[in-house]
Amino acid sequence: METQVLQVDPQRPDPQSIQSAADVLKQGGLVAFPTETVYGLGANAMDGDALSRIFVAKQRPTSDPIIAHIASVAQLTDLAVDVPDVAWDLADAFWPGPLTLILKRSPTVPDLIAEGRDTIAIRIPAHPITRAILTAAGLPIGAPSANRFTRPSATQASHVLEDLGGRIDMIIDGGNASIGLESTVLDLTSDPPRILRPGGLVIDRIRVVLPGVEFAPAYVQETEGHQSPGQMLKHYSPRATVLLFRGERRESTLERMALKAAELRDEDREVGALVTDEDAHALGEVAQIEQLGGEADAEEQARQLFAALRRLDERGVDTILVREPDRVGLGQALSDRLVRAAVGRVIEC
Ligand code: TXA
Ligand code: MG
Protein backbone atom coordinates (compact mmCIF):
# COMPACT_ATOMS: atom_id res chain seq x y z
CA MET A 1 0.00 0.00 0.00
CA GLU A 2 1.27 3.47 -0.78
CA THR A 3 1.02 5.96 2.08
CA GLN A 4 0.10 9.45 0.94
CA VAL A 5 1.66 12.27 3.01
CA LEU A 6 -0.07 15.68 3.04
CA GLN A 7 1.51 18.76 4.62
CA VAL A 8 -1.07 20.82 6.50
CA ASP A 9 -0.61 24.11 8.34
CA PRO A 10 -1.63 23.37 11.95
CA GLN A 11 -2.92 26.90 12.51
CA ARG A 12 -4.96 27.18 9.31
CA PRO A 13 -5.70 23.66 8.06
CA ASP A 14 -6.34 23.67 4.32
CA PRO A 15 -9.95 22.47 3.79
CA GLN A 16 -9.09 20.37 0.72
CA SER A 17 -6.53 18.24 2.54
CA ILE A 18 -8.87 17.91 5.52
CA GLN A 19 -11.62 16.73 3.18
CA SER A 20 -9.33 14.09 1.60
CA ALA A 21 -8.50 12.77 5.07
CA ALA A 22 -12.21 12.73 6.01
CA ASP A 23 -13.04 10.87 2.77
CA VAL A 24 -10.46 8.16 3.44
CA LEU A 25 -11.89 7.72 6.96
CA LYS A 26 -15.48 7.57 5.70
CA GLN A 27 -14.43 4.84 3.24
CA GLY A 28 -12.99 2.74 6.07
CA GLY A 29 -9.32 3.67 5.55
CA LEU A 30 -6.60 4.65 8.01
CA VAL A 31 -5.31 8.20 8.44
CA ALA A 32 -2.60 9.33 10.87
CA PHE A 33 -2.94 12.93 12.08
CA PRO A 34 -1.42 15.18 14.72
CA THR A 35 -3.25 15.80 17.99
CA GLU A 36 -2.03 18.08 20.76
CA THR A 37 -0.73 15.02 22.67
CA VAL A 38 0.83 12.68 20.07
CA TYR A 39 0.01 11.60 16.51
CA GLY A 40 -3.05 9.35 16.31
CA LEU A 41 -3.86 6.57 13.83
CA GLY A 42 -7.52 7.12 13.01
CA ALA A 43 -10.34 4.93 11.69
CA ASN A 44 -14.13 5.20 11.71
CA ALA A 45 -15.06 4.17 15.28
CA MET A 46 -18.47 2.90 14.14
CA ASP A 47 -16.99 0.51 11.54
CA GLY A 48 -15.60 -2.75 12.93
CA ASP A 49 -13.66 -3.56 9.73
CA ALA A 50 -11.99 -0.14 9.77
CA LEU A 51 -11.05 -0.60 13.43
CA SER A 52 -9.61 -4.04 12.71
CA ARG A 53 -7.20 -2.44 10.20
CA ILE A 54 -5.71 -0.36 13.04
CA PHE A 55 -4.72 -3.50 14.94
CA VAL A 56 -3.16 -5.01 11.82
CA ALA A 57 -1.22 -1.85 10.89
CA LYS A 58 0.12 -1.34 14.42
CA GLN A 59 0.61 -5.07 15.07
CA ARG A 60 -1.31 -4.48 18.28
CA PRO A 61 -3.29 -7.15 20.14
CA THR A 62 -7.06 -6.59 19.99
CA SER A 63 -7.21 -6.91 23.78
CA ASP A 64 -5.81 -3.35 23.97
CA PRO A 65 -8.82 -1.04 23.53
CA ILE A 66 -8.96 2.18 21.49
CA ILE A 67 -9.95 5.76 22.35
CA ALA A 68 -12.89 7.26 20.42
CA HIS A 69 -12.30 10.91 19.49
CA ILE A 70 -15.31 13.20 19.11
CA ALA A 71 -15.82 16.81 18.04
CA SER A 72 -18.35 17.92 20.64
CA VAL A 73 -19.92 16.83 23.95
CA ALA A 74 -23.23 16.32 22.15
CA GLN A 75 -21.73 13.10 20.69
CA LEU A 76 -20.95 11.70 24.14
CA THR A 77 -24.34 10.07 24.52
CA ASP A 78 -24.05 8.47 21.04
CA LEU A 79 -21.17 6.40 22.37
CA ALA A 80 -21.74 6.09 26.11
CA VAL A 81 -24.67 5.27 28.39
CA ASP A 82 -25.33 6.12 32.05
CA VAL A 83 -22.95 9.09 31.81
CA PRO A 84 -22.39 10.29 35.40
CA ASP A 85 -22.69 14.00 36.32
CA VAL A 86 -18.99 14.22 37.05
CA ALA A 87 -18.22 13.35 33.42
CA TRP A 88 -20.00 16.50 32.30
CA ASP A 89 -18.13 18.54 34.93
CA LEU A 90 -14.81 17.13 33.73
CA ALA A 91 -15.77 17.74 30.11
CA ASP A 92 -16.58 21.36 30.98
CA ALA A 93 -13.31 21.84 32.76
CA PHE A 94 -10.88 20.01 30.46
CA TRP A 95 -12.29 19.39 26.98
CA PRO A 96 -11.11 19.94 24.39
CA GLY A 97 -7.82 18.68 25.78
CA PRO A 98 -5.58 15.83 26.96
CA LEU A 99 -8.10 13.94 29.10
CA THR A 100 -9.70 10.58 28.18
CA LEU A 101 -12.74 9.34 30.10
CA ILE A 102 -13.71 5.68 30.43
CA LEU A 103 -17.51 5.35 30.46
CA LYS A 104 -20.11 2.63 29.96
CA ARG A 105 -20.32 1.81 26.27
CA SER A 106 -23.42 2.15 24.17
CA PRO A 107 -24.31 -1.15 22.43
CA THR A 108 -24.28 0.69 19.06
CA VAL A 109 -20.47 0.94 19.09
CA PRO A 110 -18.56 -2.03 17.57
CA ASP A 111 -17.21 -4.38 20.21
CA LEU A 112 -13.72 -4.21 18.72
CA ILE A 113 -13.20 -0.70 20.12
CA ALA A 114 -12.88 -2.34 23.57
CA GLU A 115 -13.07 -6.07 22.98
CA GLY A 116 -14.37 -8.05 25.91
CA ARG A 117 -15.45 -5.09 28.01
CA ASP A 118 -18.59 -2.98 28.25
CA THR A 119 -16.75 0.34 28.45
CA ILE A 120 -15.43 2.94 26.02
CA ALA A 121 -12.64 5.52 26.20
CA ILE A 122 -13.61 8.97 24.85
CA ARG A 123 -11.85 12.30 24.37
CA ILE A 124 -12.35 15.61 22.58
CA PRO A 125 -8.96 16.66 21.24
CA ALA A 126 -7.89 20.31 21.04
CA HIS A 127 -5.63 20.28 17.96
CA PRO A 128 -7.10 22.36 15.08
CA ILE A 129 -6.26 19.66 12.51
CA THR A 130 -7.87 16.86 14.53
CA ARG A 131 -10.93 18.99 15.15
CA ALA A 132 -11.23 19.88 11.47
CA ILE A 133 -10.98 16.20 10.45
CA LEU A 134 -13.56 15.13 13.05
CA THR A 135 -15.97 17.80 11.87
CA ALA A 136 -15.45 17.06 8.16
CA ALA A 137 -15.86 13.30 8.66
CA GLY A 138 -18.89 13.76 10.92
CA LEU A 139 -17.93 10.53 12.68
CA PRO A 140 -16.35 9.49 15.96
CA ILE A 141 -12.80 8.44 15.13
CA GLY A 142 -11.04 5.63 16.96
CA ALA A 143 -7.37 6.46 17.26
CA PRO A 144 -4.51 4.92 19.20
CA SER A 145 -1.10 6.54 19.10
CA ALA A 146 0.40 6.23 15.60
CA ASN A 147 3.36 4.00 16.43
CA ARG A 148 4.01 0.29 16.08
CA PHE A 149 2.94 -1.63 19.18
CA THR A 150 5.39 -1.15 22.12
CA ARG A 151 7.40 1.56 20.28
CA PRO A 152 7.74 5.17 21.51
CA SER A 153 4.69 7.22 20.46
CA ALA A 154 4.99 9.41 17.39
CA THR A 155 5.27 13.16 17.97
CA GLN A 156 6.21 14.01 14.36
CA ALA A 157 5.01 12.79 10.96
CA SER A 158 8.45 11.28 10.27
CA HIS A 159 7.99 8.95 13.27
CA VAL A 160 4.68 7.75 11.82
CA LEU A 161 6.28 7.16 8.43
CA GLU A 162 9.11 5.20 10.08
CA ASP A 163 6.71 2.89 11.97
CA LEU A 164 3.68 2.70 9.66
CA GLY A 165 4.77 3.80 6.19
CA GLY A 166 3.28 1.44 3.56
CA ARG A 167 0.78 0.09 6.09
CA ILE A 168 -1.74 2.98 6.22
CA ASP A 169 -3.52 5.15 3.63
CA MET A 170 -2.54 8.66 4.64
CA ILE A 171 -0.46 10.78 7.00
CA ILE A 172 -1.39 14.38 7.70
CA ASP A 173 1.88 16.14 8.54
CA GLY A 174 1.05 19.07 10.81
CA GLY A 175 4.41 19.47 12.53
CA ASN A 176 5.24 18.59 16.13
CA ALA A 177 2.66 17.48 18.68
CA SER A 178 2.66 20.28 21.24
CA ILE A 179 2.38 18.27 24.49
CA GLY A 180 4.38 15.23 23.43
CA LEU A 181 2.81 12.77 25.93
CA GLU A 182 -0.53 11.00 25.57
CA SER A 183 -3.74 12.02 27.31
CA THR A 184 -4.45 11.21 30.95
CA VAL A 185 -6.84 8.22 31.08
CA LEU A 186 -9.46 8.38 33.85
CA ASP A 187 -11.81 5.47 34.55
CA LEU A 188 -15.20 6.74 35.73
CA THR A 189 -16.71 3.25 35.79
CA SER A 190 -14.70 2.19 38.84
CA ASP A 191 -15.44 3.23 42.41
CA PRO A 192 -13.53 5.30 43.33
CA PRO A 193 -12.62 6.68 39.88
CA ARG A 194 -9.05 5.74 38.93
CA ILE A 195 -6.31 7.19 36.77
CA LEU A 196 -5.26 4.36 34.45
CA ARG A 197 -2.54 6.38 32.72
CA PRO A 198 -0.97 9.66 33.88
CA GLY A 199 -0.62 11.98 30.90
CA GLY A 200 -0.79 15.48 29.52
CA LEU A 201 -3.39 16.68 32.03
CA VAL A 202 -1.73 16.66 35.47
CA ILE A 203 -3.60 14.74 38.16
CA ASP A 204 -3.64 17.67 40.62
CA ARG A 205 -5.88 19.56 38.20
CA ILE A 206 -8.30 16.63 38.01
CA ARG A 207 -8.44 16.49 41.83
CA VAL A 208 -9.92 19.98 41.87
CA VAL A 209 -13.01 18.64 40.08
CA LEU A 210 -12.83 15.07 41.41
CA PRO A 211 -11.13 15.07 44.84
CA GLY A 212 -11.53 11.31 45.38
CA VAL A 213 -9.65 10.20 42.24
CA GLU A 214 -7.10 7.43 42.84
CA PHE A 215 -3.76 6.93 41.19
CA ALA A 216 -1.63 3.84 41.78
CA PRO A 217 0.62 3.06 38.81
CA ALA A 218 0.36 -0.56 37.66
CA TYR A 219 3.00 -2.30 35.59
CA VAL A 220 2.09 -5.75 34.34
CA GLN A 221 4.46 -8.12 32.56
CA GLU A 222 2.15 -9.54 29.89
CA THR A 223 -1.34 -8.70 28.74
CA GLU A 224 -2.88 -10.42 31.76
CA GLY A 225 -6.22 -11.13 30.16
CA HIS A 226 -8.48 -8.14 30.07
CA GLN A 227 -7.65 -6.84 33.53
CA SER A 228 -5.09 -4.22 32.73
CA PRO A 229 -5.33 -2.78 29.24
CA GLY A 230 -2.54 -0.36 28.46
CA GLN A 231 -0.67 -1.10 31.67
CA MET A 232 1.84 -3.45 30.12
CA LEU A 233 5.33 -2.96 31.36
CA LYS A 234 6.99 -2.97 27.92
CA HIS A 235 5.75 0.07 26.08
CA TYR A 236 7.21 3.22 24.55
CA SER A 237 10.46 1.28 24.09
CA PRO A 238 13.26 2.21 21.74
CA ARG A 239 15.38 -0.57 20.26
CA ALA A 240 18.18 0.17 22.72
CA THR A 241 18.00 -1.09 26.31
CA VAL A 242 16.91 1.70 28.65
CA LEU A 243 18.22 1.87 32.25
CA LEU A 244 16.34 4.23 34.55
CA PHE A 245 18.22 5.64 37.56
CA ARG A 246 16.11 6.62 40.54
CA GLY A 247 17.73 8.56 43.37
CA GLU A 248 16.94 11.29 45.89
CA ARG A 249 20.35 12.90 45.48
CA ARG A 250 21.11 14.27 42.06
CA GLU A 251 24.93 14.36 42.18
CA SER A 252 25.37 10.84 43.51
CA THR A 253 22.82 9.49 41.03
CA LEU A 254 24.74 11.14 38.20
CA GLU A 255 27.97 9.60 39.51
CA ARG A 256 26.37 6.13 39.44
CA MET A 257 25.26 6.80 35.87
CA ALA A 258 28.72 7.94 34.76
CA LEU A 259 30.26 4.83 36.35
CA LYS A 260 27.76 2.60 34.59
CA ALA A 261 28.46 4.34 31.28
CA ALA A 262 32.21 3.82 31.69
CA GLU A 263 31.66 0.17 32.59
CA LEU A 264 29.50 -0.40 29.50
CA ARG A 265 32.02 1.33 27.28
CA ASP A 266 34.72 -1.01 28.59
CA GLU A 267 32.51 -3.81 27.28
CA ASP A 268 32.52 -2.06 23.87
CA ARG A 269 28.91 -1.00 24.15
CA GLU A 270 27.66 2.22 22.55
CA VAL A 271 26.16 4.24 25.38
CA GLY A 272 23.59 7.00 25.11
CA ALA A 273 22.03 9.21 27.76
CA LEU A 274 18.85 11.20 27.91
CA VAL A 275 19.58 14.19 30.14
CA THR A 276 18.29 17.55 31.30
CA ASP A 277 20.41 20.54 30.27
CA GLU A 278 21.77 20.74 33.81
CA ASP A 279 22.87 17.08 33.79
CA ALA A 280 24.58 17.19 30.40
CA HIS A 281 28.03 18.02 31.84
CA ALA A 282 28.05 14.88 34.00
CA LEU A 283 27.58 12.44 31.10
CA GLY A 284 28.78 14.28 28.02
CA GLU A 285 32.24 12.66 28.20
CA VAL A 286 31.05 9.08 28.62
CA ALA A 287 27.86 8.87 26.54
CA GLN A 288 26.19 10.21 23.42
CA ILE A 289 23.68 12.60 24.91
CA GLU A 290 20.29 13.93 23.91
CA GLN A 291 19.10 16.93 25.95
CA LEU A 292 15.46 17.16 26.94
CA GLY A 293 15.45 20.75 28.21
CA GLY A 294 15.82 22.51 31.54
CA GLU A 295 15.43 20.59 34.80
CA ALA A 296 12.49 22.78 35.88
CA ASP A 297 10.79 22.71 32.46
CA ALA A 298 8.84 19.43 32.54
CA GLU A 299 6.70 20.60 29.62
CA GLU A 300 9.71 20.91 27.34
CA GLN A 301 10.99 17.53 28.54
CA ALA A 302 7.60 16.01 27.67
CA ARG A 303 7.70 17.52 24.18
CA GLN A 304 11.18 16.11 23.54
CA LEU A 305 11.00 12.69 25.21
CA PHE A 306 9.79 10.35 22.46
CA ALA A 307 11.70 12.10 19.67
CA ALA A 308 14.91 11.97 21.73
CA LEU A 309 14.50 8.22 22.36
CA ARG A 310 14.08 7.67 18.63
CA ARG A 311 17.12 9.86 17.84
CA LEU A 312 19.31 7.83 20.20
CA ASP A 313 18.20 4.70 18.35
CA GLU A 314 19.20 6.34 15.08
CA ARG A 315 22.60 7.17 16.52
CA GLY A 316 23.11 3.43 17.03
CA VAL A 317 23.50 3.29 20.81
CA ASP A 318 22.68 -0.01 22.45
CA THR A 319 22.04 1.24 26.00
CA ILE A 320 20.33 4.46 27.09
CA LEU A 321 20.81 5.83 30.62
CA VAL A 322 18.17 8.18 32.06
CA ARG A 323 17.74 9.82 35.48
CA GLU A 324 14.12 9.74 36.65
CA PRO A 325 12.50 13.16 37.05
CA ASP A 326 10.66 14.04 40.30
CA ARG A 327 7.31 12.28 40.26
CA VAL A 328 5.21 15.41 40.67
CA GLY A 329 3.05 17.26 38.12
CA LEU A 330 3.94 16.26 34.58
CA GLY A 331 6.84 14.31 36.13
CA GLN A 332 4.35 11.54 36.99
CA ALA A 333 3.64 10.93 33.31
CA LEU A 334 7.32 11.30 32.33
CA SER A 335 8.30 8.74 34.96
CA ASP A 336 5.54 6.36 33.83
CA ARG A 337 6.77 6.45 30.21
CA LEU A 338 10.38 5.97 31.26
CA VAL A 339 9.65 2.98 33.54
CA ARG A 340 7.87 1.31 30.60
CA ALA A 341 10.55 2.32 28.08
CA ALA A 342 13.02 0.70 30.50
CA VAL A 343 10.75 -2.37 30.79
CA GLY A 344 11.09 -1.98 34.55
CA ARG A 345 14.91 -1.80 34.66
CA VAL A 346 14.96 0.76 37.49
CA ILE A 347 18.23 1.18 39.37
CA GLU A 348 17.68 2.58 42.86
CA CYS A 349 20.54 4.87 43.87
O1 TXA B 1 -3.35 11.24 23.72
C1 TXA B 1 -3.85 10.17 23.44
O2 TXA B 1 -4.60 9.55 24.22
C2 TXA B 1 -3.54 9.56 22.06
C3 TXA B 1 -4.12 10.50 21.00
C4 TXA B 1 -3.99 9.95 19.62
O3 TXA B 1 -5.45 10.80 21.32
N1 TXA B 1 -4.06 8.25 21.95
C5 TXA B 1 -3.49 7.20 22.62
O4 TXA B 1 -4.10 5.98 22.33
O5 TXA B 1 -2.55 7.32 23.37
P1 TXA B 1 -3.45 4.60 22.79
O6 TXA B 1 -4.31 3.57 22.17
O7 TXA B 1 -2.02 4.56 22.45
O8 TXA B 1 -3.67 4.57 24.32
C6 TXA B 1 -4.99 4.47 24.84
C7 TXA B 1 -4.95 3.98 26.24
C8 TXA B 1 -4.43 2.58 26.31
O9 TXA B 1 -3.65 2.49 27.48
C9 TXA B 1 -5.71 1.76 26.42
O10 TXA B 1 -5.51 0.53 27.05
C10 TXA B 1 -6.59 2.69 27.23
O11 TXA B 1 -6.30 3.98 26.75
N2 TXA B 1 -8.02 2.41 26.99
C11 TXA B 1 -8.69 2.60 25.86
N3 TXA B 1 -9.96 2.16 25.99
C12 TXA B 1 -10.08 1.70 27.25
C13 TXA B 1 -11.15 1.10 27.98
N4 TXA B 1 -12.34 0.91 27.46
N5 TXA B 1 -10.89 0.71 29.25
C14 TXA B 1 -9.67 0.89 29.79
N6 TXA B 1 -8.62 1.45 29.15
C15 TXA B 1 -8.83 1.84 27.89
MG1 MG C 1 -0.08 4.11 22.51
Image (cartoon, helix red, strand yellow):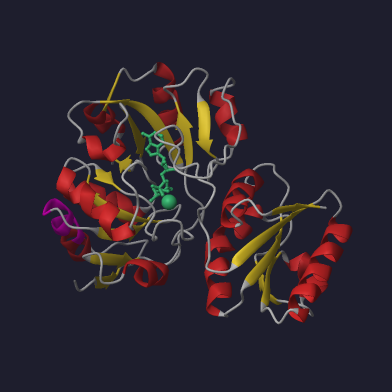
- Residue 200: % across, % down: 53, 46
- Measured as percent of width and height from the top left, residue 270 is found at 66, 79
Q: Nearest the camera: 148 or 104?
A: 148
Q: Nearer the viewer, residue 278 or 63?
A: 63
Magenta residues (range) = 21-27
Ligand 1 visible in quadrant: top left
In the figure, residue 227 lies in which quadrant? top left
* Towards the viewer: 100 or 251: 251
Quadrant containing the N terminus in the rendered view: bottom left
Identify the residue at image location x=33%, y=58%: 58
Above or below residue 51? Residue 320 is below
Quarter of the image for residue 288 reads bottom right
Q: Residue sitting at 53 percent across and 65 percent down?
A: 238
**Secondary structure of the magenta portion, mostly?**
helix
- Against 63, residue 242 (above or below) is below
Figure disc tally: 0
Q: Is residue 320 left or right of residue 200?
A: right
Tell me where residue 84 appears, x and y as whole percent. Answer: 38, 18
